Amino acid sequence: MSQQPPVRSTSSQPPRPDASMSLLTNVMHHSLDEGYAEAAARRAGEGKGLPTTLRAKLGLAAALLLAAGVVTLGAAQAQISAPTLAKEREQLIQRIEAETSAADTLQRNVDSLRSTVGSKQRDALRKHGGDKAELVSLLAGATPVRGPGIKVVVDDAKQAKSGGGGPRESSGFADTGRVRDRDMQRIVNGLWQSGAEAIAVNGQRLTSLSAIRAAGDAILVDNRPLVPPYTVLAVGNGQRLSTAFQDSADGQYLHVLQQNYGVRASISAQDEVRLPAAPSLIVRTAKPGKGTS
């Protein structure tokens, strides 16, 4: 006997289409949170809304008028002072331009006087140098020179930075990977001893009276600050000078800086290098003192 399929009851109401969206329905019907609604009702009951008495209204109006007056006064003062500030700014710009022009004029005069003094010094060297005038002028750095030589480029290590210390720190310098004044001194002295006839560092011609010093972390050559990389040009027999320098104690010192401290350096022979004349020379005469043979 076949079994009848179960018959589902149809007495219950069908579910609402928005039954699964009860949260959205609640938000739509109750847009204001109950806590906010209670606070608003309580404030209205306490009478803390807008002022209702004449005195309170007058006080609010006076406060608004005072605020508006302060804002208006500030705007008026700014508008009045704007032309004055613009005028002062224009005067300051004109003053700066005038002082800059005066400084440029003075610098041109200094350059002209320096050139005149240098010319007279070179003439004095030629006069008192006799048949060795050219050699004396060369050794004194009084004339520009050119010829074969070598180019030495020295630069700080890639990771050089302030702070730290190490076995090389002895005179206020902080970083062991930074090229220092005494490093440049040894390089220059090594080139002189290896046979260099003339040397310039970053375009600064060296003489017998030149000094390489330090000011903080900066290297000074004749009181002129230099920035890395430091390019040293030396006039001499290029290949022979390069070999002699690298075999010298100072050349080995530069090699140690490369190996141990990461200082970057390169040495290359050049067919021709050009060195300028020294910017200023001091001509001195030595005389024996009293009581000396």
Image (cartoon, grey):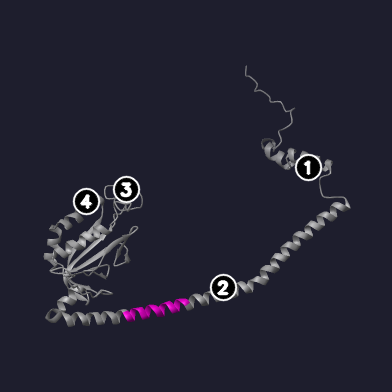
Q: Which residue is mark 4?
A: 259
**Disc 1 target residue:** 40
Task: Choose top left, top right, bottom left or bottom right for residue 128.
Answer: bottom left
Q: Amino acid at mark 4?
A: Gln
Mark 1 vs mark 2: which is more N-terminal?
1
Query: How would you classify the magenta stretch by its main secondary structure?
Result: helix
Q: Which residue: 52% across, 75% down?
A: 93
- Provide the secondary structure element on which disc 2 rests: helix
Q: Nearer the viewer, mark 1 or mark 2?
A: 2
> Where in the figure is residue 236, as x and y percent of width and height?
14, 69
Badge 2 amino acid:
Arg
Which amino acid is tagged 1?
Ala
Label 2 crowd bin: few (<14), some (14–19), many (20+), radius 10 Å: few
Q: Nearer the viewer, mark 4 or mark 2?
A: 2
Q: Mark 2 = which residue?
A: 89
**Res 208 → quadrant:** bottom left
Magenta segment: 99-113
Front label number (3 vs 4): 3
Is residue 229 shown to the viewer in this render? no
The residue that label 3 is drawn on is 165
Indicate whether 112 appears above or below 153: below
Q: Is residue 189 left or right of residue 158?
A: left
Q: Position of residue 9 (x, y in %)?
A: 71, 26
Q: Is residue 150 or residue 167 the one in the foreground?
A: 167
**Nearer to me, 78 or 1:** 78
Q: Residue at x 35, y 78 (%)?
A: 110
